[in-house]
Amino acid sequence: MKNRVMIFALLGPVISCVVLAALSGGFPSFLASSDAFVAVPIVFGVELAPFLLCALIDFFLEEARWWERLVVAAIAGFATVFMAAWMVGDIAQHSWNSWTVQIGLIGAIPAMACSWLAGRSSVGRARLAP
């Protein structure tokens, strides 16, 4: 459980920053803007709790098939990050059609990646255990 929480807590926000930069038009334009210095700490602060919740959900699904865990992690990441962004109030300023999917992807893609990595680390530990 400790490794799973560390993967979701540390890598989740980092990967979501990469997804945010990719959805913003690419890394050069995102890093050149002054928004990057404001967006990165906000992403870490807002998305830590949703990714910890995704880690808990992923822990309970540890015995499920790998693709089931990835699908559930993507849905949980989409929903929790969307709700966190809604509570912060960022969604109310934009149209629902484009920002709904973009904010959801900022949570779904990292949750899937973290779930996959956590599954790989638990498989490696299971092989080494006596």
Image (cartoon, helix red, strand yellow):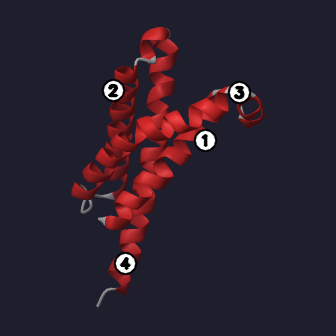
Give the residue pinned by disc 3: 34
Question: Which secondary structure lies at badge 4?
Answer: helix
Question: Which secondary structure lies at badge 1?
Answer: helix
Task: Tell which circle, 3 or 1, labels the residue nearer the N-terminal end.
Answer: 1
Quadrant of the image containing the C terminus: bottom left
Q: Nearer the viewer, mark 4 or mark 3?
A: 3
Q: Amino acid at mark 4?
A: Arg
Question: Which secondary structure lies at badge 2?
Answer: helix
| Residue 2 falls in image quadrant | bottom left
Q: Nearer the viewer, mark 2 or mark 4?
A: 2
Closer-to-camera residue (60/13): 13
Q: Which x, y percent locates residue 112?
A: 43, 47
> In the shown orientation, is residue 60 left or right of residue 86?
left
Tell me the residue at 47%/27% (across/down).
Answer: 103
Name, please, the residue furthest toward the bottom. 130
128 versus 49 height, above or below: below
Q: Which numbered circle lies on residue 125?
A: 4
> In the shown orientation, is residue 50 left or right of residue 107?
left
43 versus 56 height, above or below: above
